[in-house]
Amino acid sequence: MSCDIASHKSMAGQQQVSHYDVLQVAQNASHEEIRKSYQTLALQHHPDKRKNGFDVGKSADSDAFIRIDEAWKILRDEQSRRVYDAELMLQTCREEYFVNEVLRETDFETSQEENCRFHRCRCGGYYILPEESPLLETIHLSCDECSLIVQVNPP
């Protein structure tokens, strides 16, 4: 067992806006629905279509147009859309945490040699508790040997 905290950090998901959200369509939208939404949004946010070249929102519109264009480039092609959908599904699964077990901080043993707290996984690996103590919020930890995840609640 290694108590190298750098390799056993708690999992924190970052919420990102999907290409479907950018184009304001449902994930099961047809190619035609996506195309129409892209055209409408591109016209609204295209830098050359702005009436006033010195708008306060010019930079925001330019950024929005770039995101709209990137989303269209991925979703217009059937193959790249399939790949994107698979990646989106994988990301969603990671963010939702398939929790194997719910533990409390008191369920962790202290290793005097390694100077850390751990809980043995059913595979024989370990869940390593971060050094911050006591826990102030619920965290999720992954096993150092397998893909199981535990939820650790504060005392």
Image (cartoon, helix red, strand yellow):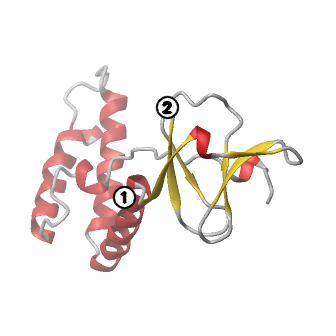
- Residue 79 lies, with reference to residue 132, above or below; the image says below
Give me the residue at 28% from left, 22% from top. 55
Give me the residue at 79% from left, 50% from top. 4
* Quadrant of image for the N terminus: bottom right
Residue 17: give x, y in percent of width and height: 33, 47
Residue 43: give x, y in percent of width and height: 17, 46
Q: Which residue is mark 1?
A: 92
Q: Nearer the viewer, residue 17 or 130?
A: 130
Residue 112: give x, y in percent of width and height: 86, 44
Looking at the rendered structure, the secondary structure element under dot 2 is: loop
Looking at the rendered structure, the secondary structure element under dot 1 is: helix
For discs 2 and 1, the disc positioned in front in the rendered view: 2
* Label 2, label 1: how far apart the Cα atoms are: 22 Å
Quadrant for residue 47, please give it.
top left
Picture mark count = 2
Q: Which circle's residue, 2 or 1, is located before the other in the chain?
A: 1
Residue positioned most to the right = 113
Residue 75: give x, y in percent of width and height: 28, 66
Is 68 on the left-hand or right-hand side of 107? left
Residue type at mark 2 is: Glu
- Residue 92 lies, with reference to residue 41, above or below; the image says below
Quadrant for residue 19, please give it.
bottom left
Q: Which mark is residue 100?
A: none
Q: Which residue is mark 2?
A: 137
Quadrant for residue 135, please give it.
top right
Residue type at mark 1 is: Thr
- Residue 8 lies, with reference to residue 56, above or below; the image says below
